[in-house]
Image (spheres, helix red, strand yellow):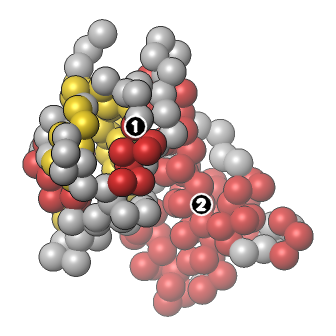
Amino acid sequence: MNRSGVLDWPHLPPDRGEIARYAGCPGGVLPPLLEECLTEAEGVVKNRVAWRCYPVSFTEEGLDLGFAETASRDLARNLLGCENIVLFAATAGPGLDQLVRKYSRLSPAKAQLFQAVGAERVETLCDAFCREFGREIPLRPRYSPGYGDLPLSLQRDVFAALNLEKALGLTLGDNLLITPTKTVTAIAGW
């Protein structure tokens, strides 16, 4: 098995129910405008994933993840019994951010739908990566910096470990938020 890589992921069919949930549509009823947004988004979404495997060990202070150490009890519970992790970053690319900015001025309804489409696209990409990676190795649920007691500051270590500026063209702001915004970093163990 490869221990690291960068993948250009093929098109993934959209989950309209999840888009409705992210858009806050009552009763899951999507406006007709969604199909127009999906068509426009399809032309700009660039699914990409960078990943690397590391051994994980439990220490008196918490966890040694192979690329960083953390005292996160929540992540330790999630990884209990695991010997390895896959660290990954998944992005839908900058195109959706551009559409949100464009339509924030022209059509707030479309901007909201593009936000929802982007959230669904990156979550679907993460799920697809974990399913594919987990075909040979059953993975624990993914866990992201900023969730539970895992500090968001771990993003700096994730960026360095995966060389995300070069690998995927991502940037990490001083506020620890990632650009493009439709990006997720996570750890899954086995």
Q: Position of residue 11 (x, y in %)?
A: 54, 36
Find the distance from the CA under tag 1 to the CA under tag 2.
Answer: 31 Å
Q: Which residue is mark 2?
A: 117
Q: Residue furthest bottom?
A: 105
Task: Quadrant for the N terminus, please.
Answer: top left
Q: N-terminal of the two: label 1 or label 2?
A: 1
Left or right of 159? Residue 134 is: right
Circle 2 — which element? Answer: helix
Residue plotted at (54% across, 27% down): 131
Q: Position of residue 118 (x, y in %)?
A: 52, 60
Which sits in the foreground, 143 or 101?
A: 143
Residue 120: which quarter of the image? bottom right
In the image, residue 96 above or below residue 47: below
Nearest to the eye among marks 1 and 2: give it: 1
Q: Say whether residue 52 is visible.
A: no
Q: Say whether residue 71 is visible.
A: yes
Residue plotted at (49% across, 33% down): 140
Q: Position of residue 12 (x, y in %)?
A: 58, 37
Left or right of 161? Residue 35 is: right
In the image, residue 183 above or below residue 176: above
**Residue type beneath disc 1:** Leu
**Residue type beneath disc 2:** Val
Residue 152's disc is none
